[in-house]
Image: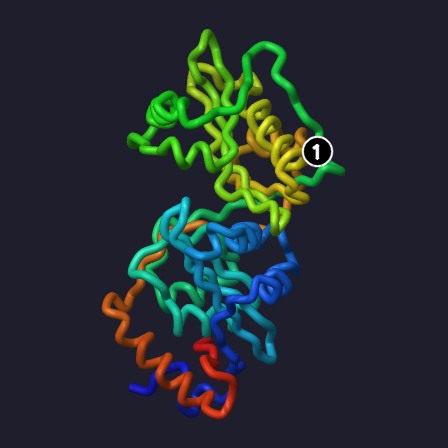
Amino acid sequence: MTDALYGPAAEARPRFRVRRVVDRRVLDAALSEDRAYAAYALGHLEPGLFEQSRFWLAEGPSGSGVLLHADGLLGRTTVVVGDPHAVDALVALHPGTRGSYLATGSPDHLEALRRTYLVLGSLEMRRMSVTAATFAPRPSLRHDVRRLGGHDTRALNMLYSTEGPPTAYTADQVNQSVYYGAFEANRLVSVAGTHVVAPHAGVAVVGNVFTHAKYRGLGLAECVTSAVTDELLNQRGCALVTLTVNPANTPAVRAYTRLGYEPGVSVIEARIRRKDALGVTSLARRWLARRAARGGDPGDELATARG
């Protein structure tokens, strides 16, 4: 059977120049069309995360795309940005490890992703973002809200574990992130943190917002998210702060809106597992793509989108 990337049927499909990129400036430019959508990828340009990340860029007649595979604080993570045909060519050649978490994808990318991966537990979410110009802080008047450190790790894990499986955040993870908690009689009852803090790229991603069931409806999630956002914007040099929310979670959307977060595009999060478990197909595709690019720059690959 002829590979769908090549052969006569591929002639009408866009062809892409694919290359691995290690120049942060090139990547920043490629990811800047929608910085809120691309916040996870931009965050991995930060020293410390960049060394644990691999970026590929695809350029062709229908547009461009960026693929990120990383293995850092968030575990094995994948992000896809840009033209769906470009994303198709990228993941066909560089599917990454056998399993990963899709931290950011577009609904328009699902068809391409499903050609390469089993897409499990897909969630369609909404990306929201805030800047210093739109931020409206919300201090807590009734509860003690303070910055968390490594010494709070046990209390943090106990709170998260009140619903769902136990968590195992470490002191280093808490210290390297920005976490704020609300306390009731010295008991941690609400928390917000960060997935990525990248002052060099000027972006941060807020996440892990959680309130104990007995304390919901008091505005605590809004207060701790406000405290995290304030530090990111006013102390950490982040010009743009983003988060991802289920649009059906009306109370959360309203809380973030009151803080000045504005809705952006829909994004997909999911667990992805490579269909080609041994990587034989992608290896053959890369060999053909490099052969097609002979005479160009070293490391270039030429691939045609499958769909």
Q: Is residue 106 above or below residue 225?
A: below
Q: Amino acid at mark 1?
A: Phe
Residue lying at 42% horizontally and 59% vertically, measured from the top left: 69
- Tell me, yes or no, if residue 268 can be seen here: no
Pick the front one: 27 or 47: 47
Secondary structure state at the residue bearing disc 1? loop
Pick the front one: 46 or 116: 46
Q: Is residue 196 above or below residue 23?
A: above
Q: Residue furthest left?
A: 278
Q: Is residue 226 above or below residue 129?
A: above
Percent position of residue 264, x then y: 63, 48
Residue lying at 51% horizontally and 18% vertically, measured from the top left: 182
Residue 62 relative to residue 94: left or right: right
Name the residue beneath numbered marker 1. Answer: 135
Percent position of residue 123, x then y: 44, 47
Percent position of residue 251, x then y: 56, 28
- Tell me, yes or no, if residue 234 can be seen here: yes
